[in-house]
Amino acid sequence: MSTTPYLSDRINNLSESATLKMTKLGRELAAKGVNVISLSVGEPDFNTPDNVKNAAKQALDDNFTRYSPVPGYPELRQAIVNKLKNENGLDYDPSQIVVSTGAKQSLSNVILTLINPGDEVIIPTPYWVSYSEMVVLAEGKSVFINTDIDSDFKITPAQLEAAITPKTKLFMFSSPCNPTGSVYSKAELEALAKVFEKYPNIFILSDEIYEHINFIDKHESIAQFPSIKDRVIVVNGFSKAYAMTGWRLGYIAASKEIAAANDKLQGQTTSGTCSIAQRAGIAAYNDGLESVKVMKEAFLRRRELVYNLLNEIPGVKTNLPEGAFYFFPQISSFFGKKDLNGNVIKGSADLALYLLNEGHIATVGGDSFGNDNYIRLSYAASDESLIEALRRMKEALAKLV
Ligand code: PMP
Ligand code: GLU
């Protein structure tokens, strides 16, 4: 990591987001005229539904252009409360909801409001790249629980309990998981909740942003268990479910105290998020799940497509993800091999760069997700792009000797 002496330790100690970095490199290569297929950034390739866009246009005409309340418009917080009740069976009051500039800010707010220097945050690996770096910003310490493809990338209650120390303050995870697509069942969540019952000082940050892209069952939230609900902070947002990545709209549902703390933090940093995006969010939640269903069907079809194509590539091992829109195949069999220029592939970041430069497909190395033996492919791309990307991947990998 390069450091600049006059910058704060906080920023010198922080790594660049690997998902955004690989996306940037892909864009730079594309700007030079290269036909790059991007499977790096996790973003639906659909457009925001028309009813949502119309609500935003209306918001402008109605002059929703001024500062909003810091935790969000009351109508949006109520729409979120209704959604949590109707879709997830969870009871919240609007005072327990804080709307932020994307789920990314929600996660960062929660970590900054809970973590003191030296506090431990348990994170199962693989995890979404920004989790561990947000802990770095808060001067906490990440404690990783390693999982791999053979356990379908899920932790057991025994692993969780073994990772807990007197310094543990927070456990954070996503289900469906970015980057593995793994989904915890109700029984698996209940078993984890039983462990947390024994440790009343630990909070649980449950990132549920992929809840609707779940191919096995209905979404289950760890907040459903009353014995721990007060310590669970649910994070969710509009980016994935409603193809609204650019609108920057996410939220938490938490105890009143944690919600008030996030409100205070946000009031001193970013204030209420974009007024127009919030009005659009109300329309998204009040108008139902039709567009979400269409997207999910496309993702399910593409999952089968990519699964079959990946299985045809020698040296690549994959599982069948149960949710989200990523594959996280094992690619460590290529480590130690050389490309045509004699460069040795030493790890997943090298392999991702090789695939970009040789195969012109952007992926992300697993090292940034806490496991170097894998790479992440997003299949939020058209069927044609996926077929061509996997063809290029197979061809490029076969050139390594
Ligand atoms: N959590 C996970 C697991 C994600 O993959 C993402 C990616 N966008 C986010 C949170 C943040 O989403 P956003 O800030 O776009 O709401
Ligand atoms: N969450 C997406 C991803 O994992 C978006 C990029 C980002 O914010 O990291 O690719």
Image (cartoon, rainbow, N blue to C red):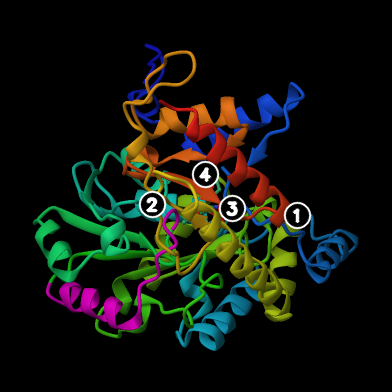
Percent position (x, y) of residue 58?
Answer: 87, 65
Disc nearer the start of the sequence (2/4): 4
| Observer able to see residue 274 | no
Numbered range of the magenta stretch: 178-198
The one nearer the camera, 372 or 267, is 372
Q: Earlier in the sequence, mark 3 or mark 1?
A: 1
First in residue order: circle 3 vs circle 2: 3
Check the image and report above or below for 298 versus 101: below
Mark 2 and mark 1: span between their CA atoms? Answer: 52 Å
Q: Is mark 3 within 8 Å of ligand 1?
A: yes
Q: Please name the residue that numbered disc 4 is placed on.
A: 269
Q: Amino acid at mark 4?
A: Thr
Q: Which mark is residue 317?
A: 2
Disc on res. 101: 3
Q: Quadrant of the C terminus?
A: top left
Kindly report the distance in space between the C-alpha atoms of the residues bearing marks 2 and 4. 44 Å
Q: Amino acid at mark 2?
A: Lys
Does the segment drawn in magenta span residue 158? Answer: no
Numbered circle sitting on residue 66 = 1
Q: Are marks 1 and 4 in contact (CB under 8 Å)?
A: no
* Residue 49 placement: quadrant: bottom right
